[in-house]
Image: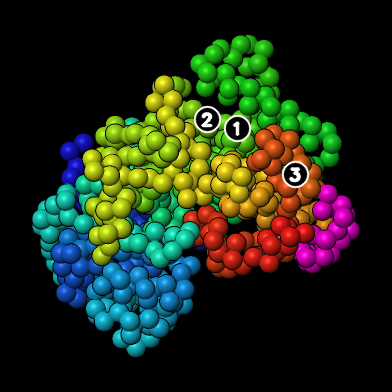
C-alpha cells in the first residue's frame, strides 16, 4: 500500500461498493448504510463543517457512542485538514469542559441531549467553542442537528471532498486523544496521519479478515485500539457492524462477526459467565464441559508448538467440538475467527480458554502515544505466543532500559502532548526513544513480555519489589472476584482489596437461599467469605513469602467507571481506590 493519510485508507472502501456496508445494531432493530450512501452523507457533512468555518488545524470534539455516524464525522473532519478530538461518554461535565478548553475546540458534537448538556454546562470555560452539533434527540436553542447539516449540501460535494482530502499531508495532525489517566491530569496525545497510517498498514499483516466478512466495533471509538481496528477494516474494505459496549453481549449472537477488537476485562467477563453457567449445570454436563475444554486446550497447545495432534486426540477433539466447543462459539455468532485485544494484560487463563474453544486472542501492546500498537501477536503458528504481547511491528526499534522499562522508537510514536512541551520532553531520551512506562523483556525470538507498569511496582518497607498485576490476575480467576487491588508500597507487607463480581455473588445467594438483592448481606455470609479466603490462600501458595497477601478485605460493592474507580477502558485507578478505602487499608495494617 502507498497510503499516506487516513483518507487514503478510506478510498479502499469505495473500490467495491455494496448495499449493506455499515450495520448499526440496536436492541430490537438494525440500521444500515450502503457504501455510496455513507460517502454521500460524509461528503455533505464535510461541506457543512466547512460552511461553519472549520479548516486546517481546527479541533472538533466528538462525544458519541460507537455508531456509523462516528466515522462519518471523523472522515469529514479529517478531509478539511482539521483535527478530531474524541472524548469518552462517561466523562463528567467538568472533565469535558477541561478537555474542550485545553484543546481549544472550535466545534463540539454530542450524541444526544444528555451528552450535549455537558458541553452546555462547560461552555463558559471554552471561549473558542463556536458551534454545537447534536446527532439525535431534542435540541436546545442554538444547537445544530447533524442530519440537517448532512442534508444542506449542494451538487459536487463528493468532488469537493476529495479535492480537500488531497491537500491533507501525512505529517498533519489527525487527532488529539486525551489519555484516560489512572492518575493525574489527562494529557492530549497528538497523533499525525503518518503515525496512524503506519500503524494500520503494518498491523494489517497480522490481522485476518476478508472483504466479505464482518468486523465488529463496540468499544468507544475514542479508544485507540478500536479506532485502529476500524481503520484496518476500512483498508481491507471489509463490512463492519457497530453496537454499544453495554449491549454487545446480547447482540453478539445476532451480529455474527468474524473479528473484533476488545479489552481484557470484556474477555474476562465472557470467560467468567461461561464458567459460571458450566459450574451451575448438573454434574454429568459439568464434567463433559471440563473434559471438552481440556481436550481443546491440549489440541491448541500442540498446534501452537507446531507438534502433530495425532489421530486419537483429533477424534476426541471432533467429539468435544460437536458436543461442547461449537456451542460455546455459537454465543459469538459462530463465525468468530479471532479477537485482537489491548489496553492491559490478558490473563493467561483467559488466553487458554479462548484457544481451547478455537477462537485465538491476538494480544497487542502499546499506548495511545504509539498509535497505539507497538507489538501484536499474529494468527499463524509461530507468530503467536501465549503470555507474550507478540513481536514489534516492522518499523519499531525497541530497547530494554537498565531498570527493565521498555523503550520504543518509530514512525508511529506520537508528536507530543498538546500544550505540554515539558511533559513531552520527559518521555523521550536523547536518542528519541519513547519511555513506555511498562516493565518487560524480549525473548530470543523477538516476543515481548510485559510484567507490570513501572509506576505500579510495589516496593515494600523491606526493599522488596513486587509486580502487582500478575497477582491480581491470579486472584481474578475466582468467579467471585471482579477486581483486585494490591497495596503495599512503603508498607511492611502486601494487602489486597477485593471487589466482588455481583453476578456471581447473586448466583451464589440464589443457590444458598439468601437474598440475592442484598449484596452487602450476602458478602457477610461465612460460607461465601470462605470462598474469598480460599482464593487468596490458593494464590499465596504460588508466591514467595514477601509477595504473599497477608490481609484482605472484600469491598461492599464492585468498582465502576461511574464511581470513578475505573477508567473508561476499565483499568483500575489505583490512587482513587486507595484514597476512597484509606480507612479499610489502615485497618488491615493496624489490626
What residue is shown at x 31% (from left), y 58% (from top)? 423
- In reply to whether residue 173 is colored magenta, the answer given is no
Q: CA distance from mark 1 to mark 3?
A: 20 Å
Q: CA distance from mark 2 to mark 1?
A: 8 Å
For label 1, the residue is 352
Residue 527 percent across, percent down from the top left: 87, 52
Which residue is nearer to you in this view: 487 or 470? 487
Side of 43 where 460 appears, left or right = right
Of labels 2 and 1, earlier in sequence is 1
Residue 62 picture quarter:
bottom left
Say which of marks 2 and 3 sits in front. Answer: 3
For label 3, the residue is 535
On-image quarter of the C terminus:
bottom right
Which residue is nearer to you in this view: 512 or 141? 512
On-image quarter of the N terminus:
top left
Residue 143 percent across, percent down from the top left: 32, 82
Q: Secondary structure at mark 1?
A: helix
Residue 213 percent across, percent down from the top left: 41, 40
Say which of marks 2 and 1 sits in front. Answer: 2
Magenta region, residue range:
510-530
Task: Give above or below for 583 relative to 357.
Answer: below
Task: Give above or below for 515 relative to 144.
Answer: above
Q: Secondary structure at mark 3?
A: helix
What residue is shown at x 32% (from left), y 39% (from top)? 408
For label 2, the residue is 386
Label 1 CA crowd tier, 10 Å (few <14, some 14–19, many 20+): many
Which residue is nearer to you in this view: 122 or 211? 122
Amino acid at each position: 500500500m502507498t497510503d499516506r493519510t487516513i483518507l487514503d485508507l478510506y478510498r479502499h472502501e469505495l473500490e467495491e461498493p455494496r448495499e449493506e456496508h455499515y450495520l448499526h445494531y440496536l436492541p430490537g432493530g438494525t440500521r444500515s448504510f450502503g457504501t455510496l450512501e455513507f460517502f454521500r452523507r460524509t461528503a455533505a457533512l464535510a461541506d457543512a463543517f466547512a460552511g461553519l468555518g472549520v479548516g486546517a488545524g481546527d479541533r472538533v470534539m466528538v462525544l458519541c457512542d460507537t455508531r456509523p455516524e462516528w466515522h462519518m464525522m471523523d472522515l469529514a473532519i479529517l478531509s478539511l485538514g482539521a483535527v478530531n478530538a474524541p472524548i469518552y461518554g462517561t466523562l463528567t461535565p467538568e472533565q469535558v469542559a477541561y478537555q474542550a478548553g485545553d484543546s481549544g475546540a472550535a466545534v463540539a458534537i454530542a450524541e444526544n441531549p444528555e451528552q450535549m448538556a455537558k458541553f452546555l454546562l462547560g461552555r463558559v470555560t471554552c471561549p473558542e467553542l463556536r458551534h454545537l452539533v447534536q446527532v439525535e434527540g431534542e435540541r436546545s436553542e442554538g444547537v445544530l442537528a447533524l442530519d440537517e447539516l448532512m442534508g444542506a449540501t449542494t451538487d459536487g460535494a463528493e468532488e469537493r471532498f476529495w479535492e480537500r482530502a488531497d491537500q491533507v499531508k501525512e505529517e498533519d495532525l489527525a487527532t488529539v486523544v486525551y489519555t484516560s489517566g489512572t492518575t493525574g491530569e489527562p494529557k492530549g496525545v497528538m497523533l499525525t496521519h503518518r503515525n496512524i497510517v503506519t500503524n494500520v498498514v503494518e498491523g494489517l499483516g497480522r490481522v485476518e479478515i476478508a472483504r466479505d466478512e464482518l468486523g465488529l466495533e463496540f468499544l468507544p471509538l475514542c479508544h485507540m485500539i478500536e479506532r485502529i481496528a476500524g481503520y484496518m477494516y476500512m483498508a481491507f474494505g471489509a463490512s463492519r457492524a457497530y453496537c454499544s459496549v453495554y449491549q454487545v453481549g446480547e447482540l453478539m449472537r445476532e451480529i455474527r462477526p468474524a473479528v473484533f477488537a476488545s479489552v481484557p476485562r470484556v474477555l474476562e467477563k465472557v470467560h467468567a459467565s461461561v464458567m459460571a453457567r458450566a459450574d451451575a449445570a448438573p454434574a454429568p454436563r459439568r464434567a463433559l464441559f471440563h473434559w471438552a475444554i481440556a481436550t481443546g486446550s491440549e489440541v491448541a497447545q500442540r498446534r501452537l508448538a507446531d507438534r502433530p495432534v495425532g489421530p486419537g486426540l483429533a477424534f476426541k477433539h471432533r467429539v468435544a467440538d460437536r458436543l461442547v466447543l461449537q456451542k460455546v462459539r455459537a454465543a459469538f455468532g459462530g463465525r468468530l475467527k479471532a479477537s485482537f485485544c489491548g489496553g492491559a494484560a490478558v490473563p493467561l487463563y483467559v488466553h487458554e480458554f479462548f484457544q481451547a474453544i478455537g477462537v485465538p486472542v491476538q494480544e497487542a501492546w502499546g499506548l495511545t502515544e504509539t498509535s497505539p500498537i507497538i507489538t501484536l501477536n499474529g494468527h499463524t503458528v509461530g507468530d503467536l505466543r501465549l503470555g507474550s504481547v507478540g513481536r514489534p511491528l516492522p518499523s519499531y526499534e525497541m530497547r530494554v532500559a537498565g531498570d527493565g522499562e521498555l523503550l520504543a522508537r518509530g514512525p508511529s510514536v506520537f508528536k507530543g502532548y498538546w500544550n505540554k512541551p515539558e511533559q513531552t520532553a520527559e518521555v523521550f531520551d536523547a536518542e528519541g526513544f519513547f519511555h513506555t512506562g511498562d516493565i518487560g523483556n524480549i525473548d530470543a525470538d523477538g516476543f515481548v513480555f510485559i510484567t507490570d507498569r513501572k509506576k505500579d511496582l510495589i516496593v515494600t518497607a523491606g526493599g522488596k519489589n513486587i509486580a502487582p498485576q500478575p497477582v491480581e490476575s491470579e486472584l481474578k480467576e475466582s468467579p467471585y472476584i471482579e477486581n483486585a487491588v494490591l497495596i503495599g508500597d512503603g508498607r511492611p507487607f502486601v494487602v489486597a482489596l477485593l471487589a466482588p463480581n455481583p453476578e456471581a455473588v447473586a448466583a451464589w445467594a440464589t443457590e444458598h437461599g439468601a437474598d440475592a438483592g442484598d449484596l452487602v448481606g450476602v458478602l457477610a455470609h461465612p460460607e461465601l467469605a470462605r470462598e474469598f479466603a480460599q482464593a487468596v490462600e490458593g494464590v499465596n501458595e504460588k508466591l514467595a513469602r514477601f509477595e504473599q497477601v497477608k490481609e484482605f478485605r472484600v469491598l461492599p460493592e464492585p468498582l465502576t467507571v461511574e464511581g470513578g474507580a475505573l477508567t473508561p477502558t476499565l483499568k483500575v485507578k489505583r490512587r482513587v481506590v486507595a484514597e476512597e478505602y484509606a480507612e479499610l487499608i489502615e485497618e488491615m495494617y493496624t489490626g
